[in-house]
């Protein structure tokens, strides 16, 4: 559950405040309608002390994305990004840069003095909206449908405040929701949020807890926001105190249960970070398998949220598919392969132990085992990249093969080319990188060294163990070996000398 369960819910220790109805009015919330202006505020300024990290809490990642990005993506499916405001504080500029591509707005909370203080800082940004939702930047599993449910329920109830609640398996440590009863029946109106330490034995039996996700009608909230105080052990302004304040002012505070308690789980510790990452990846694997992908031992695989895999692809145990990787249909990804931000066509085979990053692999290509495709690698249709072959910024043409122990960097290689074992493109002169160009139907013999810049024209042959320093014409044979010398009897004499020396 989110941090609200412990530090934020500490505010429930404070008793309900008496409100001067002459100044607060005590009138019902104004009626809301479907055309009301609606915003989302995401609280993302926390330090994350219990993570014991120097980095902003909301930039820690699960499922391949920062925590805050998960929340923003859900919110963007409900409102326009211009109506989303992230309240940031710890290393604000880093957070701003990381989330800038999403198009949302940012509100700076220079001092982190609690959740209520965060809304105070966002007052000017939110004042023009009729109502808004408050989400937590460290509650990454919130779903767009749940955001819509809270919004619609809040509109229907015309409440001043709506609290999204949950019933976890173990509510220990969290504030309990005490609902009002009418005619012996429990209603959706909240009477109080009671912190565990202050709860009676009867209240401790309640399983419904505060998730830290709220909807507010702007007029009553901002009319009473300055009634928040720091009269609590942490000397912070707690947004949970608004429940007692608004109830005391005669406003309606309603509660809506989340359909899945896991959805409102928050992250305060590394253990919770790992658990939610595991849960998110499990959901992703389930989603892919439901869509026709075979994943053997899915609990051993790491598949990021943005990965897409087409039907009838098989993923072996201990595979990592990361970033925005896209894989076509009827591929086979072997164990211990790590594929990051790559595009794989249909019928691609990735044998065990391959490392791929920012590479494109066309239909029917075969990689590995133990191939390394670095950024800019482009493998053509039906091409083979074999064991211990490394490609960097290299195009390997259709049906070309580099099957053993080669390094190919900054190269353009045509179709139907054979790259022999041990071939190296010497692309770096210590200052600049230089290109190697190999035409169609070229044969490169084993243990060749191609010193860039160099061009090997179509149809040419390079003899094994050659060092090529100048261009090779079309259909030519290039050789650059030193002449072989055989010294007859040399080995026998050497053995005799060693034996004689050993007998002394």
Image: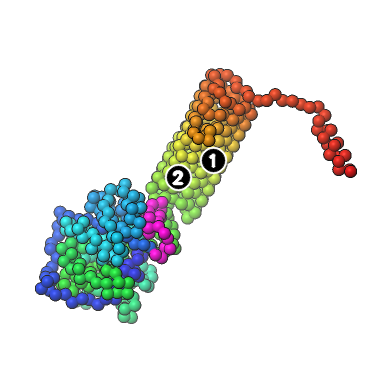
Q: Is residue 107 at all visible to an observer of this figure? A: yes
Depth order, front residue of 444/116: 116
Residue at position x 35%, y 53% from top?
Answer: 94
Q: Is residue 150 at all visible to an observer of this figure? A: no
Residue at position x 48%, y 52% from top?
Answer: 301
Quarter where residue 195 is shown:
bottom left
Furthest residue in direction left, as rendered: 22
Secondary structure of residue under mark 1 = loop
Image-based side of 82 in relation to 482, left or right: left
Decide: is 221 above or below 473.
below
Indicate the position of residue 208 as horizontal and vertical percent values: 31, 70
Secondary structure of residue under mark 2 = strand
* Magenta segment: 49-68
Residue at position x 30%, y 63% from top?
Answer: 111
Depth order, front residue of 342/319: 342
Quarter containing the N terminus = bottom left
Neighbor class of circle 1 (other Cα within 10 Å; few <14, some 14-19, many 20+) is: many
Q: Which mark is residue 340?
A: 2
Depth order, front residue of 15/410: 410
Image-based side of 487 in relation to 398, left or right: right
* Labels 2 and 1 touching (C-beta < 8 A): no
Indicate the position of residue 285 as horizontal and vertical percent values: 42, 52
Residue at position x 29%, y 76% from top?
Answer: 13
Indicate the position of residue 272 as horizontal and vertical percent values: 42, 63
Furthest residue in direction bottom, as rendered: 201
Furthest residue in direction right, as rendered: 504
Residue to which mark 1 is pinned: 371
């Amino acid at each position: 559950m989110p941090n609200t369960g412990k530090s934020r819910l500490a505010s429930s220790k404070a008793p309900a405040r008496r409100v001067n109805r002459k100044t607060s009015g005590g009138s019902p919330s104004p009626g809301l309608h479907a055309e009301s202006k609606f915003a989302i505020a995401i609280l993302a300024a926390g330090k994350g002390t219990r993570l014991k990290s120097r980095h902003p809490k909301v930039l820690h990642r699960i499922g391949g994305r920062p925590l805050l990005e998960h929340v923003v993506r859900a919110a963007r499916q409900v409102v326009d990004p211009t109506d989303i405001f992230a309240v940031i504080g710890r290393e604000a500029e880093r957070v701003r840069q990381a989330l800038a591509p999403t198009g949302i707005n940012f509100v700076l909370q220079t001092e982190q003095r609690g959740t209520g203080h965060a809304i105070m800082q966002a007052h000017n940004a939110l004042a023009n909206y009729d109502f808004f939702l408050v989400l937590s930047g460290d509650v990454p599993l919130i779903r767009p449908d749940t955001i819509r449910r809270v919004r619609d329920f809040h509109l229907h109830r015309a409440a001043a405040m709506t609290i999204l609640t949950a019933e976890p398996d173990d509510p220990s440590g969290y504030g309990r929701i005490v609902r009002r009863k009418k005619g012996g029946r429990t209603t959706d109106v909240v009477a109080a949020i009671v912190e565990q330490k202050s709860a009676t034995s009867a209240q401790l039996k309640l399983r419904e807890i505060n998730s830290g996700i709220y909807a507010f009608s702007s007029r009553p909230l901002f009319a009473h926001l300055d009634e928040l105080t720091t009269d609590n052990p942490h000397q912070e302004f707690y947004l949970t105190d608004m429940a007692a304040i608004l109830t005391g002012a005669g406003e309606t505070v309603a509660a809506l249960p989340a359909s899945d308690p896991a959805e409102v789980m928050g992250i305060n510790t590394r253990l919770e970070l790992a658990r939610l990452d595991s849960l998110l990846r499990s959901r992703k694997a389930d989603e892919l398998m439901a869509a026709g992908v075979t994943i053997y031992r899915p609990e051993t695989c790491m598949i990021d949220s943005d990965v897409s895999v087409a039907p009838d692809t098989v993923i072996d145990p201990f595979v990592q598919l990361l970033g925005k990787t896209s894989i076509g249909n009827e591929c086979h990804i072997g164990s211990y392969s790590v594929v990051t931000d790559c595009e794989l066509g249909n019928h691609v085979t990735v044998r065990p132990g391959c490392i791929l990053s920012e590479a494109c692999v066309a239909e029917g290509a075969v990689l590995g085992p133990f191939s390394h495709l670095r950024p800019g690698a482009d493998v053509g249709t039906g091409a083979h990249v074999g064991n211990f072959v490394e490609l960097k910024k290299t195009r390997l043409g259709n049906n070309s093969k580099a099957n053993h122990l080669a390094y190919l960097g900054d190269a353009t290689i045509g179709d139907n080319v054979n790259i022999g074992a041990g071939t190296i493109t010497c692309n770096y002169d210590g200052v600049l990188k230089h290109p190697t160009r190999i035409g169609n139907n070229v044969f490169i013999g084993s243990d060749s060294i191609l010193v860039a810049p160099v061009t090997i024209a179509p149809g040419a042959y390079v003899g094994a163990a050659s060092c090529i320093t100048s261009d090779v014409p079309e259909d030519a044979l290039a050789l650059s070996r030193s002449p072989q010398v055989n010294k007859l009897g040399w080995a026998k004499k050497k053995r005799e000398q060693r034996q004689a020396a050993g007998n002394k």
